[in-house]
Image (cartoon, helix red, strand yellow):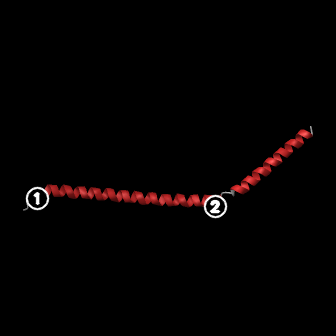
Amino acid sequence: MDANAPDQPELERLRSELSRLERERATEVAELRSARHRIMELEAQLAASRDRLPDPRAMAVRAKRVARRGVGSLLRRLRNR
């Protein structure tokens, strides 16, 4: 037997360590896949919610119209006193 060859207990320890590392890697890969899937779901939800948002310009026009109406009715009420 070669003097540099690992003995049987060392070989078993290395196999055990390799097996443990492979299991850890498989777990990490599964976690990454799950996280990637969740990110894709959230991105899809965000894109869908953006489609439902009203146009900001239309909202600004509406807000100005409501403000003018509010000021006009306030002036009328003050005049009618």
Where does residue 44 sit, x and y in percent of width and height? 55, 61
Where does residue 60 sit, x and y in percent of width and height? 73, 53
Mark 2: secondary structure: helix
Q: Earlier in the sequence, mark 2 or mark 1?
A: 1
Residue indicated by mark 1: 4
Whether residue 27 sits left or right of residue 18 in the image: it is right
Amino acid type, label 2: Asp
**Residue at left offset 8%, top offset 58%:** 3
Determine which of the numbered discs, if any, sits on residue 69 in the image: none
Whether residue 2 sits left or right of residue 11 in the image: it is left
**Residue at left offset 14%, top offset 55%:** 9
Where does residue 15 sit, x and y in percent of width and height? 21, 58
Residues at circles 2 and 1 in contact by the CB criterion of under 8 Å: no
Residue indicated by mark 2: 51
Neighbours of disc 2 within 10 Å: few (<14), some (14-19), many (20+) = few
Neighbours of disc 1 within 10 Å: few (<14), some (14-19), many (20+) = few
Q: Quadrant of the rendered structure where residue 22 is?
A: bottom left
Whether residue 16 sits left or right of residue 44 in the image: it is left
Amino acid type, label 1: Asn
Q: Nearer the viewer, residue 32 or 8?
A: 32
Q: Quadrant of the rendered structure where residue 8 is?
A: bottom left
Quadrant in the picture for the C terminus: top right
**Residue at left offset 54%, top offset 59%:** 43
Quadrant in the picture for the N terminus: bottom left
Whether residue 21 sits left or right of residue 8 in the image: it is right
